[in-house]
Image (spheres, rainbow, N blue to C red):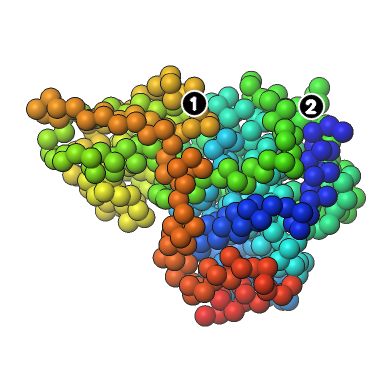
Amino acid sequence: MNELEQLSDFIFNFDLEKTHCDVVETAKICVLDSFSAAVGASKDKLIVDIIKKYKEFYNSENENGIYVWGHNIKLPVVQAAFINAMMGHKLELDDVHTNSKTHIGTVVVPTAICLAQYLKSSPKEFLEAVICGYEVMSRIGMGFGVSSHRNKGWHVTSTAGTFGAAAAAAKLLKLNVKETTHALGMAGTQSFGLWAFLEDSASSKILHPARAASSGIEAAMLAKAGMTGPVSILSANDGNLFKAMSDEYDMAKVTKDLGVVFEIKNVDNKPYPCCRSTHCAIDSAIQLKKLYIIDVDDIEEVQIGTYLVGYKQCGLTEGSKNPGTSTEAKFSTPYTFATAMINGNVSLEHFTAESINNEYVHSLLKKVTVYSDDEFTKRYPMHWGCKAKIVMKDKNVYEIEVKDASGSVYNPVSKNDIKNKAIPLLKVAYEDSVIEKILNIEKYSDMFMESFMKQEAEN
């Protein structure tokens, strides 16, 4: 069997009852974290305007319609997954699998919830789909070769995301091994997504997980209908996906320890609503404030050394050096460091137009220089770290190194932290009780997904 066939065999044979309880509990936490991040964005103006337009084109108020989270609106299953996945990426609070640089939850969780609702799947079937989606998406992402894939301009959340969504959908649709392989092949031929949005602060980044989710569902549906996909897409002489998108791909990572090591256990949960590559700098600012008495007005300069991808993504662009939009600020190490140094934290309120254009914050961020550090580049992608050096006007120097940002598997947040993160995000549309419902999903009936979403949406 080739790598795609091995993944398909894993998906088909995966059984929740034979899986370690830690993996299952982690899956439920990932569902909560991803769902709450999406709901928190449900009232965003751009999201609301998109939903209105989609309702015009795709309105589906019949029994087969699926709820858009946070809205009493139903759409066909593919479009509902598309919108919900889009919301999941909007606030930049979605989880990160660092070894593949993928935001898995924003693709896989909407795919699994929406399709499980449509099929009236059991909680067991739903969780199996989530775990399979996380496993496949992370492994394809690692196979790409994180640094080379990113430096070529590819956004791995979408390039690997189609595979993750197809895996989850194939499990829920009960495809056999051959059909699942075809679904993954068709997912691969729809692999897409580029980082060009960052250059002009386009809002289209959220399109990437959305299209990955819808493409994955459609790939599985087409396979179920009999369409065949390129089963050699990862190894073909002509049209090899890995070779086309990376100079450092590693096929072995796709199946290494498959079914033994579960990559869902290696997912980071983001405490700050901005690019994960800025989080180590935010942590460095917060820690320096705790360790020393630092008067921001007396700072002469700040130097932050980090891994090459983090520098390129959040310290090299003109937008990162002088952010004027929410997207630019969320991908700016100088802005997020300055915000953390002044406020002691970074939260959603710091990405409003008023906060982004705050002159005091800009006076500090202009003193911040970000550079690529060889040592941190060598540690990446296993460790997303940095070192920060503050030089004061009196020439005193304060330095710190952050090997792993808070929320990583090496510096984890607690289950209660994730629950507390979810509460303010969910309150825009749901009661707090939804948290315990998700974390105890196995106690509910097969109709759980539909009855839960309908009840909450009507509150």
- Residue 308 point in image, percent of width and height: 45, 25
- The residue nearer to you, when weighing 315 against 13, is 13
Q: Disc 1 marks which amino acid? A: Arg
Read off the residue under disc 1. Answer: 379
- Circle 2 or circle 1, nearest the eye: 1
Give the vertical position of 303 relative to 90 (above or below): above
Give the vertical position of 32 relative to 392 (above or below): below
* The image quarter in which residue 386 lies: top left
Q: Is residue 244 left or right of residue 84?
A: right
Pick the quarter of the image with the N terminus: top right
* The image quarter in which residue 83 lies: bottom right
Residue 85 in sight in this render: no
* Residue beneath the point at 75% across and 67% down: 122
- The residue nearer to you, when weighing 24 against 59, is 24
Q: Disc 2 marks which amino acid? A: Ser
Residue 365 in sight in this render: yes
Read off the residue under disc 2. Answer: 235
The label shown at residue 169 is none
Q: Is residue 440 left or right of residue 383?
A: right
Q: Is residue 241 left or right of residue 386?
A: right
Q: Are marks 2 and 1 in contact (CB under 8 Å)?
A: no
Secondary structure at numbered mark 1: helix
Q: CA distance from mark 2 to mark 1?
A: 28 Å
Q: Which one is earlier in the sequence, the residue at label 2 or at label 1?
A: 2
- Residue 432 point in image, percent of width and height: 48, 72
* The image quarter in which residue 458 lies: bottom right
* Residue beneath the point at 61% across and 57% down: 25
* Residue beneath the point at 76% across and 58% down: 17
- Residue 437 point in image, percent of width and height: 58, 71
- The residue nearer to you, when weighing 399 against 105, is 399
Label count reads 2
Secondary structure at numbered mark 2: loop
